[in-house]
Amino acid sequence: MQNKLEPKKCIDAGDMSDGNRIMLWGCNGYNQQVWGYDPAMGTIYLAKSAGSNASNADMCLDFTENPGDGSQLIV
């Protein structure tokens, strides 16, 4: 997922492990930068978290705590 303000930066899940913080990183097309949206569940998920081309909503964006100003996103 690309950043609109800085199109050369993408939302990246690092090593795609549970609890890993989300970061901006140079776009490279790796699995940790491929996101999907599930409208039925209202979740944003790592589309290739299973290491395949199949969608897998097992790893979703979440907050480290109750959402509010300054809350960090994690996988």
Image (cartoon, helix red, strand yellow):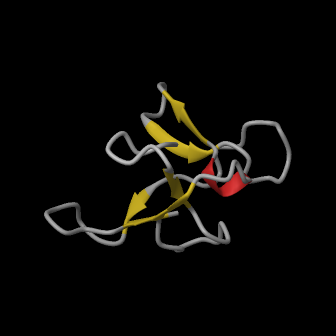
**How many marks on residues?**
0
Identified at 53% across, 31% down, the residue is 38
Task: Give above or below for 27 relative to 25.
Answer: above
Residue 56's spot in the image, x, y percent? 71, 43
Task: Give above or below for 67 relative to 5.
Answer: below
Identified at 49% across, 25% down, the residue is 40
Most foreground residue, 22 or 62: 22
In the rendered view, does 35 fall on the left or right side of 69?
A: right
In the rendered view, does 12 fall on the left or right side of 73?
A: right
Identified at 64% across, 44% down, the residue is 34
**Residue 68 appears in which quarter of the rendering?**
bottom left
In the picture as drawn, the residue positioned furthest to the left comes out as: 69
Residue 59's spot in the image, x, y percent? 61, 55
Residue 69's spot in the image, x, y percent? 13, 64
Task: Give above or below for 19 relative to 4.
Answer: below
Identified at 48% across, 43% down, the residue is 2
Residue 58's spot in the image, x, y percent? 65, 51
Task: Give above or below for 45 relative to 55.
Answer: below
In the picture as drawn, the residue positioned furthest to the top comes out as: 39
Most foreground residue, 60 or 48: 48
In the rendered view, does 27 fall on the left or right side of 53?
A: left
Most foreground residue, 37 or 12: 12
